[in-house]
Image (cartoon, rainbow, N blue to C red):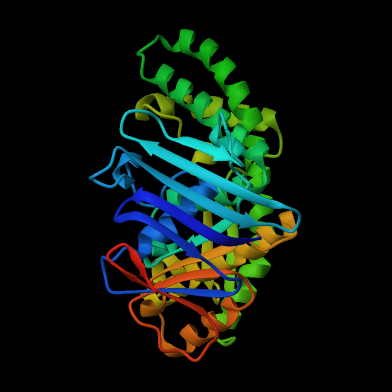
């Protein structure tokens, strides 16, 4: 799988542009605030249907326009594909695959696979478990639509259960109502936990391999799924019932996959608590590189790697190792300057335009 062409119209600071990409390393070079990250954002929109940074999607529309458009041309092992996304100030965005509008964003998942990494992804290691759950959910959903539906179902049930906990009902009345939500929650919980356990189990050896490569075998990375341990739905229901008074006091459900986490260690030491920022960054990058292999195993072709301003955050040895790695997969990497002796397709960006 590879991107052959990207077309943008009134997208952020790009009024109109067309960019051809090649297999292997594509370097997007330019000074700060010229639109390099905007290109990666546009490509990532075609992966999961949302931005990795915009809280409001209408922000991507150029200030002088009423709409914006992304059109991505994708070459696959069998056949080609075109993903088109249109943003309007008046209506919801429209997503088309090969010219046909889709009804649900889940229809986009798996059409084009990509992995994104930037210095901000340090939060994958350093910040809250929510960031690591999001990492698992996005990755699993790219190759498994059933998981995406299951996750949405779980969140709906969880929201309804939490509403009931806040309604100040009599405890006896609440116990009867909770039986309904607990049963539904337990069914989804067990399935989600199994998907995530399996994901971390498959991810670990690839992440260890990537981390050993980046650190020249000086450190050993470890991953462990931290979540529900019950083996049956009945056990999960019992746990939810046992926690009822606690949940009433808190006003929300305190147990379930929405509390899952991944423990990351270097040489058996928790890197989130005790690792240096350099170690945390390398761990986060290793997880992202491992994503490539996980997805490849699922769809039999590597996804595209999107790297935003990563080189400035690595020492020379890790930069060279990363660039060598990027030769094996189509990579779009942004930077302010590029003076490395590697074969690449170099694009100069200035004020939302590709310099010829």
244 or 340, which lies in front? 340
Query: Vertical placement of 109 versus 180: above or below?
Result: below
| Farthest residue, direction front | 356
103 or 100, which lies in front? 100
The residue sitting at 67% across, 43% down in the picture is: 144
| Quadrant of res 120 | bottom left
- Label tally: 0
The residue sitting at 58% across, 15% down in the picture is: 180
- Is residue 133 at least partly visible in the picture? no
The percent coordinates of residue 102 (x first, y second) are 57, 32
| Farthest residue, direction bottom | 341
The residue sitting at 76% across, 54% down in the picture is: 78
| Quadrant of res 101 | top right
Query: Vertical placement of 179 versus 173: above or below?
Result: below
Query: Vertical placement of 169 versus 300: above or below?
Result: above
Q: Is residue 228 left or right of residue 234?
A: left
Q: Quadrant of the C terminus?
A: bottom left
The percent coordinates of residue 274 (x first, y second) are 40, 71
The percent coordinates of residue 226 (x first, y second) are 56, 52
Query: Vertical placement of 219 versus 121: above or below?
Result: below
The percent coordinates of residue 44 (x first, y second) are 48, 53
| Quadrant of res 106 | top right
239 or 177, which lies in front? 177
Q: Is residue 295 left or right of residue 159?
A: right
């Amino acid at each position: 799988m590879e991107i052959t062409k990207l077309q943008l119209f009134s997208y952020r600071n790009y009024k109109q542009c067309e960019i051809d990409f090649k297999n292997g390393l594509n370097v997007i070079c330019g000074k700060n605030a010229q639109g390099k990250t905007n290109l990666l954002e546009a490509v990532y929109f075609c992966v999961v249907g949302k931005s990795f940074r915009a809280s409001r999607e209408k922000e991507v529309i150029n200030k002088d326009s009423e709409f914006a458009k992304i059109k991505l041309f994708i070459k696959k092992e069998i056949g080609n594909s075109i993903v088109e996304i249109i943003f309007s100030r008046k209506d919801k965005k429209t997503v088309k695959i090969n010219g046909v509008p889709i009804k649900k964003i889940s229809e986009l998942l798996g059409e084009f696979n990509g992995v994104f990494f930037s210095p901000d992804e340090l939060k994958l290691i350093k910040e809250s478990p929510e960031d690591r759950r999001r990492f698992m959910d996005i990755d699993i959903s790219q190759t498994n639509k059933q998981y995406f539906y299951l996750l949405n179902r779980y969140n709906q049930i969880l929201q309804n259960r939490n509403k009931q906990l806040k309604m100040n009902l009599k405890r006896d009345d609440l116990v009867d109502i909770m039986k309904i939500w607990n049963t539904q929650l337990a069914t989804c919980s067990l399935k989600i936990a199994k998907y995530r356990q399996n994901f971390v189990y498959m991810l670990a050896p690839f992440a260890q391999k990537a981390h050993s490569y980046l650190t020249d075998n000086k450190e050993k990375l470890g991953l462990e799924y931290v979540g529900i341990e019950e083996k049956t739905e009945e056990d999960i229901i019992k746990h939810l019932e046992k926690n009822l008074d606690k949940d009433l006091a808190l006003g929300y459900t305190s147990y379930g996959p929405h509390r899952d986490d991944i423990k990351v260690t270097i040489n058996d030491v928790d890197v989130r608590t005790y690792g240096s920022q350099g170690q945390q960054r390398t761990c986060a990058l290793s997880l992202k590189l491992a994503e490539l292999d996980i997805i490849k195993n699922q769809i039999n072709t590597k996804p595209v790697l999107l790297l935003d301003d990563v080189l400035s955050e690595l020492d020379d040895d890790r930069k060279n190792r990363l660039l060598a790695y990027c030769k094996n997969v189509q990579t779009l990497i942004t930077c302010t300057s590029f003076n490395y002796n590697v074969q690449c397709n170099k694009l100069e960006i200035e004020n939302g335009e590709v310099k010829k």
